[in-house]
Amino acid sequence: MTKYVCERCKKEFKKKSNLDDHLSRKKLCESYEDRLAREKEQKEKEKEKKQIEKAHKLAMKEENKFISHLDKVIQQTEEHKKLQEQERQNELIRQQELKKQQEQEELRLQYERQQKYEEQEMLRQLELKRQRDQEEMIIHHEIQRQKEQEELRRQQELQKQKEEQESLRQIEIQYQKRQTELRRQHDLKRQKEEQESLRQIEIQYQKKQTELRRQQQIQKQKEQDELIRHQEIQRQKEHEELARQQDLQKQKEQEEMLRLKEIQRQTEEDVQRQKEHEELARQQELRQFHENRKQMLLQQIEQKNNEQVRRYERTYEGRFKKTLGLLPKSSY
């Protein structure tokens, strides 16, 4: 079998007519060298495309890993913040309970003092009555002595009250200072933790950037610089706000001290003027207080009894007795 070959494209034909048709076309066939060059170019282009796709896939995998790591770090920081908020709330609740206990103890002490003072006055009145029956001349001397003793006692009570007020104020000032110190410590811890997390993230990010192209490295470095600047600006603002708050607290404390000094001066002048008026007013207030106290206690006792009876009525035995009329009428 003879084969006919085109000299230009080196294509083989079985018949001569087919070769003639091939040569008689308007568009000439490609040369063998051009075809080989075109095939080489296509192969090279395909290889380049595959390499670019592999590099793109690797970059996408690394970015996904980096994003997942960032999400984990953010979740950890949020959980840490929540725990700190819960601790603060628990501390506030404990402080409130302590304040309530202190107030209750103060009220109890005041009530005991008032009772002691009342008992002393009753005994003093009985002694005065007996002494008046025995000797009238002795009564005048004793009355003068007793007045002097009462004045001394009142002065001592006033001094004690002033000392108690000053001690409470000092305790409140110390408590405020401790709170400010704790807040500063918490803020410093937060800042240190944030700085360490940012440093770790920056180190990992820089290692991954070395594997990418130079253009991407330059752009990412610019973005990091901008983020660091923003963070520094925010930190400076926070420090300034803390300094302002501290200055305001100091000014408030100074104003309160001045105000307390002025109040003490005014009270010393007013006490001397109002001694005579307070003696009569105290006796009347004590009588009214005892009467109101008795009424309140009686009402509370009645309410408690009624509540106990109503609770008992809800049980099976209480309903049965209610039907029989064995319970007191106040429960109905």
Image (tube, grey):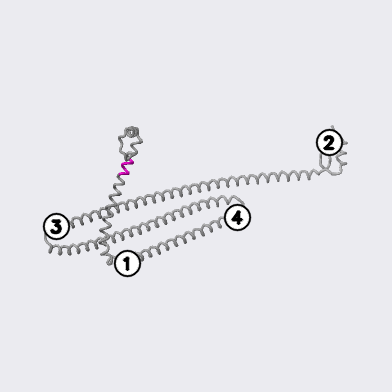
- In the rendered image, which residue does mark 4 sit on? 219
Q: Nearer the viewer, mark 4 or mark 1?
A: 1
Q: Amino acid at mark 1?
A: Gln
Between disc 3 and disc 4, whose residue precedes? 3
- In the rendered image, which residue does mark 1 sit on? 266
Between disc 4 and disc 1, whose residue precedes? 4
- In the rendered image, which residue does mark 3 sit on? 130
At 66% from the left edge and 44% from the top edge, which residue is drawn?
50
**Residue 44, position in %: x, y?**
70, 45
**Residue 128, position in %: x, y?**
16, 59
**Residue 151, position in %: x, y?**
22, 63
At 40% from the left edge and 55% from the top edge, which residue is drawn?
182
Q: What label does residue 319 carry, if any?
A: none
Q: Nearer the viewer, mark 3 or mark 4?
A: 3
Q: Residues within 10 Å of mark 4 (few under 14, many from 20)?
A: few
For the residue pair 226 and 43, the one nearer the viewer reads as: 226
- Bounds of the magenta segment: 302-307
Q: Amino acid at mark 3?
A: Arg
Q: 261 above or below 10?
A: below
Q: Residues within 10 Å of mark 1 (few under 14, many from 20)?
A: few
Secondary structure mostly taken by the magenta-highlighted segment of the chain: helix
Q: Residues within 10 Å of mark 2 (few under 14, many from 20)?
A: some
Q: Residues within 10 Å of mark 3 (few under 14, many from 20)?
A: few
